Every structure is written in C-alpha cells, then in structure tokens.
Image: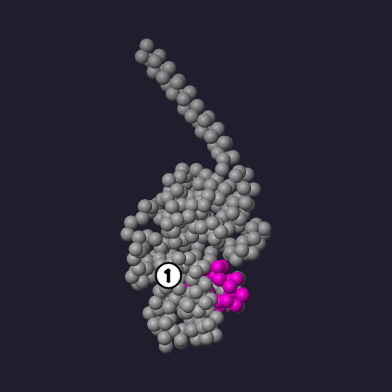
Amino acid sequence: MTRRMSTRRSFIETLSAAGLVLAAGTASADDDKSTVRLLVGLAPGGANDIAAHLLADKLRELLGRPVIVDSRPGAGQRLALGELRRARPDGKTLMLATNSPFTIYPHIYAKLDYDPVKDFTPIAGVMNFDMGVAIGPKTDVPDLKQWIAWARANPTQAAYGTPGAGTLPHFLGVAFSKAIGVDMPHVPYKGGTPAMTDLAGGQLPLLINGLSDMTEMHHAGRIRVIAVTGEKRSTLLPEVPTLMESGIAVSSVITVGIFGPAGMAPELVTRLNTAITQAMNSPEVRERFVKQGLVPATATPQALAASLAAESKRLAVLVKASGYAPE
C-alpha cells in the first residue's frame, strides 16, 4: 500500500513538474509579445528623452514587440532607478540613464537606496556627450588661452557656472580650476538653460555644460564655445579644440547607456545588446540622432561596465578635492 501511494505521489509530482514546464514555455512565448518599458529619469524634452524615443521606435521593429518610453523624472534619475531595481529581470523593464548615478552619486551621498554595481545590469552603450566650455559675447578674449590669462589676473571674478551642484560639469570645473591654478568660484544653476541665459547676458564669465545644448546658441553668436571636454574634437563643433589640445590635462564625457535590473540571464543581455547596437548603427537612427545634436556611441555590456568603473574611480578623487557635500 505504501509503495503504491509512493508511486502515485511520484507520478503526480512528475505530471506537476511537466505542467510547470509547459506553463513556463507558454509564458515565455507570451513574453515575446509583451511590452518593454524604457524608463527615463530626466525631464521630458531633454536629450535623454529624445534619444529614448528615437531608440524605442527602432526597437519596436527589431524586437517585434511594443516598446514604450516611461518618463519618471526626479531626484537626479534616482526615482527611475528605484523602479528599475524593483523590476523583474525579464527584459521587460529597462532604463536609459547617464553615468552620474553610477559614477558620482556613490561619492557624494552618504547613503543611497541602491548599489550602483550589484543592483543593475549594464546592457549597452547608446551615446556620449562631450561637454563644452563656453564664454559670453561680452567676454573680451579670443580663445581659451587668453581666458586663462584673464582668470589668473582676476581670480575672484573668474567664476564658472554649471547646471547644478554635484553634476559632472561641476566636478569637471574643479579639475579645470586645479589645472590652471585658479580657485574659480562655482555658480550652480538649476539646469543648463538658466545658466546659458546668464552667460549670454554677461552675468556669468564661463559655463561648463553639455555640448549638444550649446551648439545652437554658439552658431547664433549668443555664446562662444572655446573648448570641448572629449579626448578628440567633437563632430558637432569640429573647429573647437579640446582642453587637452589647449594644454589642459582634463577630459571627460557623459556616457549614456541602457541598464536592466540585477540578475538578468546572460543570453537575454546579449540579445538586447545586439538589438540596441543594431538600432543605433542603422543609418536612419544615426541620422536622426545627429540632427538632434546627439552622438551615437555603442558599447558591449562589458565595455560599458568597465567605463563606469574607471570613471567612478577618477571622479572619487575630484569629488573629494571639491569638498562638496549635498544639502
């Protein structure tokens, strides 16, 4: 009797297991048609939001499934990161994010509600932003070299503005100040737009900001970009030299990538990276990016992770040197 009951139990368990496998297979097939959410943690209308919509349009075609952009601005992308961290690692919730939450925030916030390495999966690089160093039309110097000479002669007036305290432009300004030997006062703004308004109006001597946001005003003659921060000249303003070319040993770019929650299967990450890379390399997407002043820059998950690790290590030094502590 006991043996028959044991056999019957084993048979039922086998059927149950088979049923679970069948159900899992069915769910997997359904998942192939389910919607992918692409989170964006910055304000609608900005460069990240534009890039996300351009990318989502192409991914719908390549993945054969709906891809929607889900805007969750707030707390410097941390609200969207919280949503991503809590998501299932099934590839249905992704995020387009800049490098700041992974490379700067761990060094400026005493406590974060996420681990920048353990809680997320780097999937693909999307684009890089050079930053620009710009002066206003009232600044009577022809180039960066002459501006530095003026700053050394007028150190208390040689202030630099940025889109905000604790941003990458802020800490790039710290590095720039040290490189030229001038303790430049920092003027943080609540975003790049008001900072550029003051620069164009003559209230600010120098501004460090995302280059793509500066090009229109530069071409209109309202501001003048005198250097870019990448390792080589930008295709947006090829006539403008880099800081490195000008003898300033400072370079940095804002990296933008696609991330998922922790625990994603390697084969899923590979499939998504392939689709994202294919989308970014398609002529129509590249053309639309360039028209928006965005510079495509694809990367493997490994390359993206390595880039973030190296940038985090470098920025740790700059953050410490700045003495910055968030309010």
Residue 166 sits inside the magenta stretch: no
Residue at the right extreme, as displayed? 284
Horizontal side of residue 160 vs 45, given as left or right:
left
Question: Is 13 rendered above or below residue 302?
Answer: above
Instruction: Indicate the position of residue 55 as horizontal and vertical percent values.
Output: 59, 54
* Closer to the camera in the image, 158 or 323: 158
Residue 213 sits inside the magenta stretch: yes
Residue at 64% x, 64% y: name it.
Answer: 291
Range drawn in magenta: 208-231
Locate the C terminus and report the quarter of the image it occupies. bottom left
Q: Is residue 121 visible?
A: no
Instruction: Indicate the position of residue 13 as horizontal and vertical percent values.
Output: 44, 23
Q: Please, what is the three-letter code of the amino acid marked with disc 1?
A: Pro
Instruction: Indicate the position of residue 275 as horizontal and vertical percent values.
Output: 59, 51
Q: Is residue 100 visible?
A: yes
Question: Is 238 rendered above or below residue 275?
Answer: below
Residue wearing tag 1: 188
Horizontal side of residue 106 vs 36, given as left or right:
left
